[in-house]
Amino acid sequence: MDDNLKEINIALSVQTTGWIGFGISPYTGRMPGSDVIIAWVDQGKTYLQDRYATGYTVPTLDTQQDYTLISGEEVNGRTILKFKRKYNTTDSKDLPIEGGTTRLIWSYHSSDPSSPEAFTRHQYQGTRSLNLFNAMPEKDKPPLPDDTQTMDILAKNITIPSKATTYWCTAMRLPTINGTAHAIKISPVIQKGHEGLVHHIQLYDCLFDDSLHGTSEDCDSENMPYGLGDCRGAALFAAWAVGGEAMSLPAHVGIPMGGTDGTRYVLMETHYDNPNRQSGVIDQSGMRIHYTYQKRQYDAGILQTGRAVGPFQMIPEGLKLWQTIGYCPEDCTRRNLPASGVNVIGGMLHTHLAGRSLKVLHYRDGKELPNLASNPHYDFNYQDIMFYKDEIKIMPGDQLTTICGYETSNRKKITVGGISTENEMCLGFFLYYPKQELSVCLSYESYLEMLPFTNALRAAGQTPPYNDYPSKPPYLWDVLYGNITIGHSKHLQTFYELMKNIVPHQYCAARNHRLLQEKQNMPMKKFIRTIPAMEIANSAKNTIYSALLTFVALAFSSILI
């Protein structure tokens, strides 16, 4: 990647002496709409063609050839190609190469084409998502010190439940650290053959009684000890998600372990995604921590931002686009960040299956700065940390706004926030230094403000029955996971207006969810509002009710919760 020339250099090496296809897919990993090249070497001459795919047929030759051949050769039955192109060619038939996830496609054949226009159907094909701009190059990963030790935090022969979604919790007291140490590399340890079942693993830094060491339970079962409940969703120590690789920290930071402020206890939360409901599968997956006593210059921490996970994150059915907005408000950063601010090294953005795009806006003194993070082509099956080439400063009083775009075109009922892959989330996780107490900076919509809308749906027969709270079951937050519809008429417009104008509540907390704000239920007093966008799928006019507009809103609320 050459950021000065805005140019990417690509090298391919394929075990074939036939033609090779390679390209960028528009968010899908499939051929239609892809920007591709087809290349081959024949009798010492290299051919490279810039093409574009309109369907599952031979891609069309582009009238504007924007890929430049550097070299090509065949060596011992292998074809080696080198070529380049601009990040943005301005050709309408090419796709721009952007930050975030890039979905690559490839194919090849054992024979060359009989002519430059006559191609035999590929024999091999595949797709792969990559982070082209923000992955840490291998050459930049610092070598492990001589005294590096490892500790494995693994599931204890868990029999994965035969249900679609399980979150399994394992509590561990870490081995004794003499003084303090730094974790400098985190590696996933996924049991062979279970790659399709282990979706993500999170290690939470928490405090609990020593008697809970070794606890291994379904996180959401009645057997889960009460004393571990405050660990989940609070201070993140490390994380891995499907598609990700081992994370090496830059040479100037480490995550503190031991001592009075470092991590001494962890709760490992493992998400098993088992849509086929396999039974009898025993798992020992987990994480490997590489640590050293040669402490680095700074202690690093992880800050979680976005929209708090819960069923009042409602996404209407049948939409090409719906945006959820989550805020980390200026009140939270002003109270909890040092005067000199903190430095963000990288981040990871997270939604579930309906997620298509995410970005985190950054405001200071009412002015918008460059995005803290952006992934316009999110891939649920490829979630890896994005390391920044230049660190980003967050100052006290800054606001972070997380915007998640979803598509529910093929869904017949609403999608709500929750832990299942069929539910949704809207979160960002940012690695920064120096570490502070602040671990969670989120927003949510209050129950009482959502209730009039859900009651209108209930009156229209568009929700299962529920009882008003406080009362007896069924409660509203339980039935939201059921068969609820909003439709595309007056209820949709009412809900959109509600989301445009509602005053979110803030949630700022430290390890074990210790509150770092004035009170528990706290409407945001001052924030820069982002208007969500909505687009109905298959609409004749393809109407967008609102573009992304922003304005400063001083919202002083006296809502009783």
Image (cartoon, helix red, strand yellow):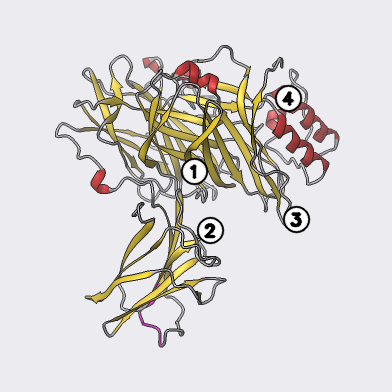
The label shown at residue 28 is 2
The label shown at residue 390 is none
Q: Residue placed farthest to the top in the image?
A: 518
Return the residue at label 3. 539
Looking at the rendered structure, the secondary structure element under dot 1 is strand
- Tell us which disc is closer to us: 4 or 3: 3
- Tell us which disc is closer to us: 4 or 1: 1
**What amino acid is labelled 3 in the image?**
Ser
Among numbered discs 3 and 1, the one appearing first in the sequence = 1
- Residue 382 appears in view: yes
Segment tinted magenta in the rendering: 108-114
Magenta stretch mostly in which secondary structure? loop
Whether tag 4 and tag 1 are in contact, CB under 8 A, the answer is no
Return the residue at label 4. 449
Q: Residue at x 32, y 45 (%)?
A: 136
Where, by quadrant of the figure, is residue 303 drawn? top left
Q: Residues within 10 Å of mark 2 (few under 14, many from 20)?
A: some
Where, by quadrant of the figure, is residue 283 drawn? top left
CA gap between label 2 and label 4 equals: 37 Å
Up the image or down, 300 lies above or below 114; here it is above
- Tell us which disc is closer to us: 1 or 2: 1
Looking at the rendered structure, the secondary structure element under dot 3 is loop
CA gap between label 3 and label 1 equals: 28 Å
- Residue 79 appears in view: no
Q: Residue placed farthest to the bottom in the image?
A: 114
CA gap between label 4 and label 1 equals: 30 Å
Q: Which residue is drawn at 45% across and 68% down?
A: 36
Residue 286 belongs to the span the image colors magenta: no
Return the residue at label 1. 374
Q: Residue placed farthest to the left in the image?
A: 146
**Quick one: quadrant of the N terminus?**
bottom left
Between 260 and 24, the one nearer to me in the picture: 24
